[in-house]
Amino acid sequence: MSIQKWGGIAAIIEAAVYIFGFVLFFGVLDSTDYDTPERYLVFLIENRDTFFVGYLIIGIVFSFALIVLVQSTYQRFKQVSPELMKFSAAVGYLWVGIVLASSLIFLTSLGVVAKFHQVNPEEALIINRGISIIVDALGGGIELVGAVWVLVISYVALKSRVYSPLLHYWGMLVGIAGVLSLFSGLSFLASNVFFEATTAIFGLGQIVWFLVLGIVMLKDQPHTPTSFA
């Protein structure tokens, strides 16, 4: 099977991983009653195996599927805009590394925090807060890197008239939302509902983008698109 088809499968896997993550972390793992940092840490430790499996899927599986998708999109569009596609591939692989790093840090921390909590709950809480900041910074608190990758792919595909332009306009909107998540930490934007929601908009929007991209890649019969600068 061609790298193009494998890329289509990888994109559909990415969409499925996003859906799995939303269902698990906003449905199954309901932490509503654990409304303080201390109580949430207890909730995390009590459900550590579920969190472990969850991060295996949303972190490790996502990352390796993304490697395939980055490679396949590069191969598909490298003749159209070689320099932009080199840039997109570099950004895509950087995204893979960031997601993998945040996931492995979180997976490693589960056992460490649980052990510390048995001895010193206060110290375990401090450690967990530090880990949470690192994991959030790398793994989705700011979606800049993934957003730039989506924007470049969408721009190149739109200009080369490959696949539906609606898909690419959607990808650009999703990418812009991800880029805007960079600014949600500014004090005068911290309470702005839109900027607070940009990460969720990026995640939900990517479900549609990955799914449709995967379908069209599986159906596509590659030919040489029009080149542009």
Image (cartoon, helix red, strand yellow):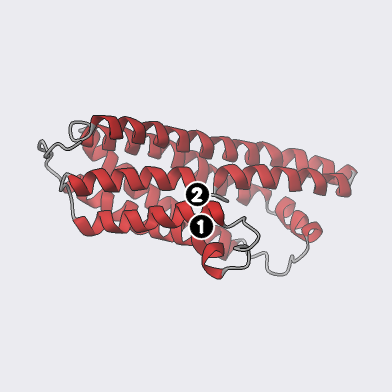
Q: Report x, y in % for residue 194.
A: 51, 67
Question: Which residue in the protein does label 1 denote?
Answer: 199
Is residue 214 placed above or below 91 in the rendered structure? below
Say which residue appears at 72% left-offset and 69% top-offset: 33
Say which residue appears at 33% left-offset and 49% top-offset: 12
Is residue 225 placed above or below 39 in the rendered structure? above
Say which residue appears at 18% left-offset and 50% top-offset: 163
Q: Report x, y in % for residue 126.
A: 81, 46
| Disc 2, SS | loop
Circle 2: residue type: Glu
Q: Quadrant of the C terminus?
A: top left
Mark earlier in primary sequence (2, 1): 2
Q: Report x, y in % for residue 102.
A: 59, 39
Answer with left or right where residue 29 lies relative to residue 39.
left
Please tell me in which quadrant of the rendered image residue 2 appears: top left
Circle 1: residue type: Thr
Local packing at callout 2 (Cα closer than 10 Å; few below 14, some 14-19, many 20+) is many
Please tell me in which quadrant of the rendered image residue 202 appears: bottom left
Local packing at callout 1 (Cα closer than 10 Å; few below 14, some 14-19, many 20+) is many
Front residue of 138/62: it is 138
Task: Return the mark for residue 143.
Answer: 2
Front residue of 121/101: it is 101
Front residue of 109/184: it is 184
Is residue 126 placed above or below 223 in the rendered structure? below
Answer with left or right where residue 48 lies relative to residue 54.
right
Marks 1 and 2: in contact by CB < 8 Å?
yes
Front residue of 145/41: it is 145
Q: Report x, y in % for residue 172.
A: 33, 54
Q: Quadrant of the N terminus?
A: top left
Say which residue appears at 33% left-offset and 39% top-offset: 69
Residue at mark 2 to residue at mark 1: CA–CA distance: 7 Å
